[in-house]
Amino acid sequence: MSTPLRQGLNKVYLPNIIFKLVRSPNLQPNQVAFRVPPKCNKFDIHSYLTNIYNVNVQEVRTMNYATRIKRRKDGRVTGRDAAYKKAIVTIDEPFAYPAEPDLNTLGGADRDLARQAAGRKLKGWRFRAQPDEKAQEKKLHDEKLAKLQAEQEKK
């Protein structure tokens, strides 16, 4: 006699790899470029895109890029860029990249306030904010609080 299946006991395996979409202007309309971890092989890339995103993959080409070492003029190592693999995937239908975000408007007032707050710090000293900056911070905080309360009331 078999034991009945109980809900919640089936194991679900989620991928622990990250694919970064790379904009490459010299690709065909039905090709997409990804930056993937070096340990991924073509079969992993093909199965990931097929099973997770339901994409019909025609071909996968990969290129390995070694670790780049950043050095100063005197020869000291200042940092390293991690090794990665670039995968060019050919799919059966044309692919359109999402629109590029406008970095000037991204963040808006919050970014400006953060820049001002960072500018007030100098070698560990913190200068007090000007009264108009405090009023602007309070206004933004109140607006965010009102939005959150309105969203909670809708629920």
Image (cartoon, rainbow, N blue to C red):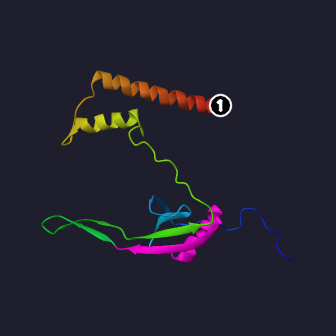
Give the image quarter of residue 52: bottom right
- The magenta segment is 39-66
Reply above or below: 44 against 27. Answer: below
Give the image quarter of residue 83: bottom left
Q: Is residue 13 visible?
A: no
**In the foreground, 145 or 51:** 51
Q: Is residue 123 left or right of residue 7?
A: left
Q: How many C-alpha atoms fall within 10 Å of the one at disc 1: few (<14), some, or many (≥20)?
A: few
Q: Is residue 31 visible?
A: yes
Reply above or below: 95 against 46. Answer: above
**In the foreground, 11 or 74:** 74
**In the foreground, 63 or 18:** 63
Q: Is residue 1 left or right of residue 19?
A: right
Q: Position of residue 144 (x, y in %)?
A: 49, 30
Residue that carries the numbered disc 1 in the rendered image: 154
Reply above or below: 124 against 20. Answer: above
Give the residue type at disc 1. Answer: Lys
Q: Position of residue 146 (x, y in %)?
A: 53, 27
Q: Report helix, strand or loop for mark 1.
A: helix
Q: Is residue 125 left or right of residue 17?
A: left
- Identify the residue at horizontal 76%, vertical 62% (top origin): 7
Give yes or no for residue 90 being in the magenta stretch.
no
Give the image quarter of residue 92: bottom right
Q: Position of residue 148 (x, y in %)?
A: 55, 32
Number of numbered callouts drawn = 1
**In the foreground, 58 or 130:** 58
Q: Position of residue 10 (x, y in %)?
A: 71, 67
Q: Quadrant of the N terminus?
A: bottom right
Q: Quadrant of the C terminus?
A: top right
- Identify the residue at horizontal 17%, vertical 68% (top origin): 76
